[in-house]
Image: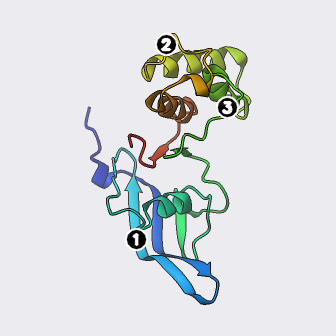
Amino acid sequence: MIEQSPAQAPVLCEARGVVQEFPRPEAPPLRVLEGIDLVIREGEVVALLGPSGCGKSTLLRIMAGLVQPTKGEVRYRGAPLVGMNPGVAIVFQSFALLPWLTVIRNVEVVLEALQLPSEEIRRRIDDVIRMVGLVGFEDAYPRELSGGMKQRVGMARALAVHPELLFMDEPFS
């Protein structure tokens, strides 16, 4: 079987000429991104590197459809991205867990939104809990977990939806 190299693989997500500015009172807008072009193909692993405050998280939010760019466009599978990117899951640098839900429920809540059969939800939860090393902590609440364990719950939640594209914003910090 001949495998396709990532360089020849179809484009999943693309930023074209992305500019992002944030308004400031009594000052010109703060431009955090300028002229960003980025292509992400199926099978690629891409890392955005740079100092704190340079716009890495902002670019991820734009490519996920959480924020609209000031200028430029994002395309997903060739079509202009409007609203949330349907093929993306995000692991945020802040844990973003629901503190009143257990580990299982924090994962389950995103799967319920997909309207999957209950057996499939259970199977996916079991798979990702095992994958991220949280077996034995399924009924724990976020307040009972270490920071690293909370981040693994976020990873489990993102992986459970089987995304085409996984954005991780400083997941190991």
Element type at marker 1?
strand
Residue 121 pos. (x, y %): 65, 20
Helix, strand or loop status at disc 2: loop
Near-viewer residue (126 or 97): 97
Q: Quadrant of the C terminus?
A: top left
Q: Nearer the viewer, mark 3 or mark 1?
A: 3
N-terminal label among 3 and 1: 1
The residue that appears at 25% across and 37% down in the rendered structure is 2
Note whether 93 is above or below 105 in the view shown.
below
Quick check: can you spot residue 149? yes
Query: Mark 2 against mark 3, which lies toward the viewer?
Result: 3
Using the image, tell me which numbered label, if any, was put on residue 135. 2
Q: In the rendered view, would you say 119 is above or below 45?
A: above
Distance (Cα) linking label 3 and label 1? 37 Å
Which comes sooner in the sequence, label 1 or label 2?
A: 1
Residue in the picture at 43% in, 66% down: 53
Locate residue 27: give its quadrant.
Answer: bottom right
Amino acid identity at mark 3: Pro
**What residue is rendered at 27% in x and 47% in y?**
5
- Contact flag, marks 1 and 2 (Cβ < 8 Å): no
In this figure, which colouring scheme has been used for the structure?
A: rainbow
Name the amino acid type tagged 1.
Asp
Specify the quadrant of the image occupied by residue 37. bottom left
Q: What numbered label is drawn on residue 37?
A: 1
Label 3 environment density (alpha carbons within 10 Å; few <14, some 14–19, many ≥20): few
Give the residue pinned by disc 3. Answer: 99
Q: Residue 144 in the image: x percent, y percent? A: 57, 22
SS at circle 3: loop
Instruction: Please state which amino acid type lies under the numbered disc 2.
Output: Val
Count of numbered badges drawn on the protein = 3
